[in-house]
Amino acid sequence: MDRILLGWAEEDITPKKRIRLMGQFYERVSEYVETPISVTALAVECSGDSAVFCSCDLLEVKESLMENIRKKLSEAGAFGLGLDVSKVLLSAIHTHNSYVYSNDDDYSSSSTLSLLRCLLPGQQNDYKSLVDVSADGIMSPDEAEELISSRIVSAVMRAWRGRAPSFIKYGFGRVPIANCRRVVYDDGTAKMWGDTDTPNFCELESGTDTGMELIYTFDERKKLTGVVVNTSCPAQVLEHRSFVSSDYFGKTKAMLREKFGKDINLLALVGAAGDQCPRDLIRWVEPETPLNDPNIVRMNPKPRLAGPSMFDIPGCVKTAKRVYDEIVSVHEEIDSSPLIGRAEFSHISEVVQLPLRRVTHGEYMNALKIIDDFSKSASKIDYRYNASLHIYAGTIIRYRHQQNHEFYNTEMHFIRLGNAAFVSCPFELFLDYGNKIRARSPAALTFIIQLACGSGGYLPTARAERGGHYSAYVSSGNVGHEGGELLVRKSIETLKSFWKS
């Protein structure tokens, strides 16, 4: 076993002017910065292999951004420094309070809004924005991508150049911050953010995962330098609000720095959480102020002693405090355990072909009819129609795409670091898949990283597909449950091969 070399770096990506915010069907422009946003890189080299993790305070990591980063790293001399750019993996914490950094959502030939513009006649295809996203002083998506990509490259290169002999400790904690966000009714249907205060409510579709995988890092002087954190809860407490924020992870980092010093790093990795959220749909607590999302409207909601609201800053602080407290508690528990300076290390980066989730001809024709019927009665498109027609426009796009494509090319990373394993994928991966991987993994700790090195949309279970609604529609992702089971099988086989060898 060889010495572990680690390097940390962080770059600020907080905008200096207003930005378009990504993550809802309705348009938002930032009004102010609630919490700074950043990118954090951790470079690992050991046993002749390497990995550079980079956690980004973004909604997602689009394939175009991934390609751009690797190109810029190559141009910056990564190869000459011994850095294999294919071993760099970017992941997003899924904050809905960060940049729109590409025009794909509005103008690409594969976007639902673009298709609606083509299908709807005359003035109906003149989209009416909720806010003016092109006003003076608002950063353009191109500007945003240039800023983000340059800072990510800087963080990765600085982390790689700064790697030095280091130590690690493994840890595990429990944090009750995630809840299933899909509600099942007695007719077999399901709904994201569904109302549970109704006679036909049966159950939540899946469970939750309170586990939190942890790795603490130390320098040669045995001083704590950072923490790798893996929670199965997306950073989207504040997802509807119109400000810039790194959500609960940013607040957790601030708390850690207040205790351990300003140089402490936090690598925030979100696990399988496609069907998870920070809100308790059973003990529903209303947002402090109304929001532009019809799915979260409750008629005559009952007062619950389950606050604070997980739509607002007090709830975000509460979530961060739970994560922080457990990180500190576990750190104290393992204080006397030995530092690990040598480890087995392996890293496989692979493009896995998963079957494209397909649409039948009947579903395609029905989607065309619904949009045609809509065009005969509606006036102009706004965010409400964009949301309600998303399923049908997405069905049409998928049907056309599948005429020439069978698979979705899925970049995945499989890593062994001593007794810990890492598996990454580009999906909002439903919890059941992460549970299957962890249950059969040979590692003492298994880190699942969703929304990494691509943006494949939701990957629902078979049960979710039967129940329907957003996150389980064909339009919600590229791969269905058959691909999900293949992803699990591939992950388990690869991890087991690390331990066999």
Image: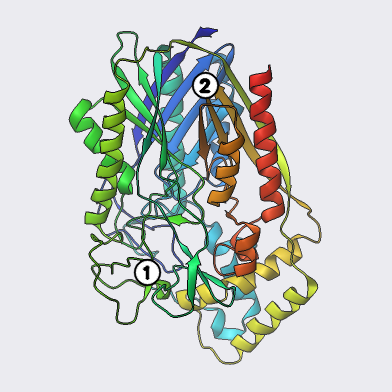
Residue at the image point whose x is 36% and y is 76% from the top: 297
Of all residues shown, which one is farthest toward the left?
258
Q: Secondary structure at mark 2?
A: loop
Figure check: 471 above or below 166: below
Residue ID for mark 2:
419
Figure check: 103 above or below 145: below
Where's residue 82, x and y in %?
A: 56, 15
Q: Is residue 382 something that shows in the picture?
A: no
Residue ID for mark 1:
132
Figure check: 48 above or below 350: above
Where's residue 208, x and y in %?
A: 45, 51
Residue 311 figure quarter: bottom left
Quadrant placement of the C terminus: top right
Instruction: Identify which residue, 161 or 278, lies in the foreground.
Output: 278
Total marks drawn?
2
Figure check: 331 above or below 472: above
Quadrant placement of the N terminus: top right
Spatial CA span between label 1 and label 2: 51 Å
Residue at the image point whose x is 52% and y is 62% from the top: 205
Residue at the image point whose x is 81% and y is 61% from the top: 403
Instruction: Identify which residue, 485 or 287, lies in the foreground.
Output: 485
